[in-house]
Structures are given as structure tokens and as C-alpha cells.
Image (cartoon, rainbow, N blue to C red):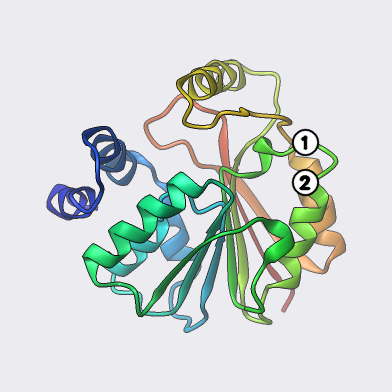
Amino acid sequence: MDRTTCARIAKLYDSRLQRGYVMGKLANDPVYAATVAAIADTQLPLLDLGCGIGLLGQYLSAEGHRQPYVGLDHDERKIAAAQRAAQRAGLNATMTLRHADAAELPALHGHVALLDVLHYLPAERQPALLQAAIRHLAPQGCLIIRNVLREPNWRFHVTRLGEFFLRTSGWIPDGAQHYPTAGELRVPLENAGLDVRIEPLRGRTPFNSYLIVARALS
């Protein structure tokens, strides 16, 4: 995304700290463009689980997507910031943002995004969230996951250090709980009849992040 568009979106947010965060994420994080590519040429709505301050919805709108976007997050502060930004952008007709958790998913079927969410849940809760996401896929929908995977390499250790600072800063108070392996994600998705593609998605960061795209088998 070009710098002018990033700056326009950043100005929708309240504080200088939030605006700096938005600029950095939109300019440098490849997950938003990867999501656009995954859902291109479809008219399905998108359910964003753990949407934070609604950056995916803002990015999709800036890229010309007008399909309904529903973002859910359990952090009331982030949802409030996302709602204010959507209102300032005039996106209330297409962006719905709610304070909720995985037990309160709306009756919506389309694409589902889980971007940097799973590792903030304990290991025993991650399969349930995956199954909930799968149940909300439309027949032509795709499940888009970006997550750190547990691997014995330097990127994983750098990621853990970065997560420590996120927790101590208060941005994500509870911090990371369990980093899944590729197999922990691939097996339940394939057992649900989905075709699964896993590839690195790190952008300019040193973190051990991967993109997982799962679609119904043709």
C-alpha cells in the first residue's frame, strides 16, 4: 500500500501511538495484501476473528472491496478504536465491529481470517477456534490464517522475545500461550476436507510467521 493511503488510514485513529502503529503495519506487513489476493474475484463476506483495531477491514476498503466485513475481538479498547476509525472513514455500511469472543460468532458464512490470533490461546482452546472458523466457511470461501509456528530456529526465538515486549507493554496483556506447529494446523484442516497451503509470510520482519490458506477441495 502506498504511503499516502497508509497515512490517510492512520489519521482515522485517535492517538499518536496508534497512528504510528497503523502506518508501520500497513506499510510493512504483507498479510493484508496476501488476504486480498486470497479472496480476489469473490463476492463473499469476510469474518475477521481477533480483528484488533480493524486494520484488515480498512485495508480491504482502500483496495476497493465492498463486500461486508465483520470484525470481532475480545478487547473492548481495540474494538472501540476500530469503531471510531470506521465511522470517521464512513464505512459503517460495510464494516461491522463487535466486542465478542469465539463463543459468540454471528450467523455469517463466507471467508474467515485468523491473523496472529491462535498463539494467544492455550493449546486446548485452539482446536475449538479452528473448528468454529471452519463452520463459518461458505462453499467457495477460504480460511486465511497468519501465525507464528513453533520451529527450532532463530526466527522463532526472536518472535518469542518480541512477544515478551508486547505483553509487558500492555498491548496484549496475557501474551502468547501456545505456538502451534505446522502439523497442529494442517491435520484438523485437512480432516475437515480442506486443501491446505502453508508458506512463510515474514515481510521485512525477523519473525517466524507463516500464511496458511485452506479451501474446500475441488
Q: Are marks 2 and 1 in contact (CB under 8 Å)?
A: yes
Q: Position of residue 154 (x, y in %)?
A: 58, 15
Q: Position of residue 108 (x, y in %)?
A: 62, 78
- Neighbor class of circle 2 (other Cα within 10 Å; few <14, some 14-19, many 20+) is many
Residue receiving disc 1:
122
- Neighbor class of circle 1 (other Cα within 10 Å; few <14, some 14-19, many 20+) is some
Helix, strand or loop under label 1: loop
Camera sees residue 75:
yes
> Which amino acid does the dot numbered 2 rest on?
Gln
Is 41 left or right of 152, judged from the image as shown? left
Is 188 left or right of 101, judged from the image as shown? right
Q: Looking at the image, which is closer to me, 162 or 102?
A: 102
Cα separation, mark 2 vs mark 1, equals 7 Å
> Which amino acid does the dot numbered 1 rest on?
Pro
Residue receiving disc 2:
126
From this view, report whether residue 131 is shown above or below residue 66: above
Helix, strand or loop under label 2: helix
Is 143 left or right of 186, judged from the image as shown? left
The residue located at (64%, 18%) in the rendering is: 153
From this view, report whether residue 128 is shown above or below residue 27: below
Q: Position of residue 81 (x, y in %)?
A: 36, 51
